[in-house]
Image: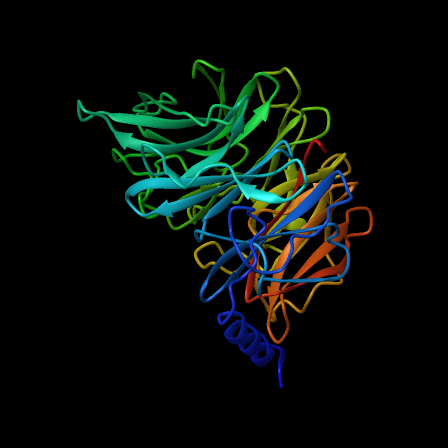
Amino acid sequence: MTKKNIYSALVAAALLPATFSCDKEDKGGPEPPTVTQPYQYVVVATSQDGTYILQTDSITSGQISIVGNGIETEAATAWIFYNEKYAYDLVYKQGDPAEVAAYELDPDGLLRRRLNTYQMPSRYTTYGYFDKYVVTAVSVTRADNTPGLSFNLLDVETQQITEKVIPGGNFTGNGETANLSGILEVGDKFFTGICTTPAVNAGGSTGTATAFPDSVWVGIFDKDLNCTILRDNRLSYATGRYRSGYHTNLAKDDNDNVYVFSSAYDSRTTRPSGALRIRKGETTFDPNYFFDIQSLAGGRHLFKVWHITGNYFLLQMYNTPNQTSEAIWSILAVVDVEKKTYKEVTGLPAVDKITSIGNAPYAGDGKIAVPIVSKDEYPHIYVIDPATAVASKGLEIVAEGVAAVGRLTYDKQ
């Protein structure tokens, strides 16, 4: 019997008795685990029947299963882990307002839902966190039929949501409408990539083409949403595009230097997929820094980026050189932004075997843990050492998919 068949049999059997949830309000099922560590790793696993969040002491080895375990939740498009205290799932509802639920560890270290699922005022195309808020943003048409940028600000303590809408037309001075890509907290401000399009409310359209494919803009927002805008013409706009989503291409190092990556998504751009730098405290691009990643990657473009530690960043790459239109991103690579080196990660399943890479890895202890689903076996967490760009096969998840991994801490009783 194959692993897939074993999994199907286990799920069928698990549907007969009541299943255990870490949420102590649920009745029946086995006793909850005893947690001895001051933290727990949270793994988001999926099957045809639902999405489950699981907890475990370790992600470097062992096995966990969705069968009889975890808390069932909505199939989220994105997960945000806020300062190892809360985990948020963001559920995309096409043109409708987004839904969100929050999770935390109770005083016994057991995972629980903070409140039932509740609704954002609007949909979103990008997200992140800043100060005491989980933030989503989207381009909208305001009541007076002019372009706007809508921010949903979810207070992580009060769990109250505030919507703020600011003008979005001619935002960068180029006459086009602004769409934002990423929310990156840096000190008391947040950075975002700005992608401009000629149409009002173009946030959900990947086909609306800017007249400026050879420019990159970054916005630096304060807590009152006042924005300082930076522009450079050495890269194309800073975003990874897929359907209506604007996936962040911004990341910071340990010293709050911001690296602005570009996937060079627009097929008309003459700029390579690469990176620029904004030094800590500066409001201009570093004129002496330019990193051409595409040439080192054999012509491949980057799609997403995550900081690991120090000068190391992890890139999710397109499989084929000069490819940006199809969603195939099975190659991971480590770059050292100071030395400007590029190494593709080894120790992973073969590229043609990988079916998905989770959208929320966990960086900690000098390494990064990435959820990966591949053919003919259960999903696993792979832990990547950035110094060597070698991945070690870690936790096995008895499920069909795995979307995210993070870590939460708690105050013991």
Q: Position of residue 166 (x, y in %)?
A: 33, 20
The quadrant in which residue 136 appears is top left
Q: How are the residues colored? A: rainbow
Quadrant for residue 199, please give it: top left
How far across and down, in percent of the image, does residue 154 sit? 44, 28
Q: Position of residue 84 (x, y in %)?
A: 65, 35
Indicate the quadrant containing the N terminus: top left, top right, bottom left or bottom right: bottom right
* Residue toward you, 16 or 44: 16
Q: Residue at x 61, y 71 (%)?
A: 353
Residue that extends furthest to the front in the rendered view of this protein: 28
For the question of whether residue 314 can be seen, the reply is no
Residue at left offset 53%, top offset 72%: 11
Residue 299 falls left or right of residue 165 = right
Q: Residue furthest right?
A: 388
Looking at this view, is 192 or 136 the one in front? Answer: 136
From the viewer's perspective, is residue 357 above or below residue 171? below
Q: Is residue 363 left or right of residue 188?
A: right
Q: How many marks?
A: 0
The answer to whether 183 appears left or right of 290 in the picture is left
- Which residue is at the front of the view, 326 or 150? 150
| Residue 166 visible in this rendered orientation of the protein | yes
Instruction: Name the quadrant containing residue 410.
Output: top right
| Quadrant holding the C terminus | top right
Instruction: Give the residue displayed 75% in from the left and 34% down from the top.
Output: 338
Front-most of residues 271 and 64 = 64
As drawn, the residue found furthest toward the left would be 144
Q: Is residue 199 above or below residue 297?
A: above
